[in-house]
Image (cartoon, rainbow, N blue to C red):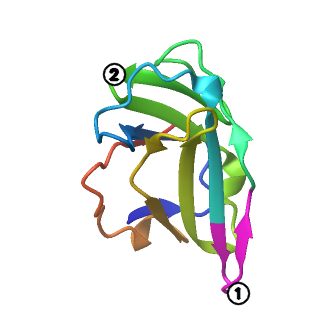
Amino acid sequence: MRDVIKGTTSYTLKIRLFNALNGGEQIGITIADLQLKYIRILDSGEPTDSGWTTLAALAGSGSAWDDNKGIEISEGYYRVDIPNAAFATGAGQLSLLVQDSVNDIIMVESVEIQLVKDAGEIVKENSPQSWLSTG
């Protein structure tokens, strides 16, 4: 699980996408065919679902962060800019999901995020794919 400070903005996630039929790297996906969804577990314990949002393409891998946009950065690796609302205060956990809206053959490891109050609460990064940047 990754730790992210509540209220974080301009969060970029780098993920690896796989073909669910053969397990191989999924390369060359049209970004507009990908959808993003996040589920927040509120402090009260109630889940809230953002619904699916179609991603738009970034101009390049070095582009500034932009809400609900993405780009393939290397074979099978994709950059996805997560909406600021996903990290708003009032929730303690967040799950991110990405799917291929056209072929339904994309799979990605579940991305689970623990939302913490401040940097002092961030003790460690447990994900083997710990590529994360803000800004």
In the picture, residue 46 is in which quadrant?
A: bottom right
Q: Percent from the top left, x then y, of residue 7?
A: 64, 58
Residue extending furthest left? 128
Residue 79 magenta-drawn? no
What secondary structure is marked by label 1? loop
In the picture, residue 19 is in which quadrant?
A: top left
Q: Is residue 134 above or below residue 6?
A: above
Q: Which mark is residue 74?
A: 2
Q: Which mark is residue 80?
A: none
Q: Residues within 10 Å of mark 1 (few under 14, many from 20)?
A: few
Judging by the rendered image, the residue that carries numbered circle 1 is 44
Query: What's the CA distance linking mark 2 and mark 1?
Result: 40 Å
Asked if the residue under mark 1 is in contact with the one under mark 2, i.e. CB atoms within 8 Å, the reply is no
Q: Residues within 10 Å of mark 2 (few under 14, many from 20)?
A: few
Query: Tag 1: residue type?
Result: Ser
Q: Residue at x 42, y 48 (%)?
A: 108
Q: Percent from the top left, x then y, of residue 35?
A: 64, 40
In the picture, residue 38 is in which quadrant?
A: bottom right
- The answer to whether residue 7 shows anywhere in this view is no
Front of the two marks 2 and 1: 2
Looking at the rendering, the stretch of residues picked out in magenta corresponds to 40-50
Of callouts 2 and 1, which one flags the residue occurring earlier in the amino acid sequence? 1
Q: Is residue 9 above or below residue 64?
A: below
Residue 42 magenta-drawn? yes
Nearer the observer, 62 or 49: 49
Nearer the observer, 15 or 63: 15
**Left or right: where does residue 132 sit relative to residue 38?**
left
Q: Percent from the top left, x then y, of residue 9?
A: 62, 46
Which of the image's four quarters has the N terminus? Answer: bottom left
Q: Residue at x 59, y 53 (%)?
A: 8
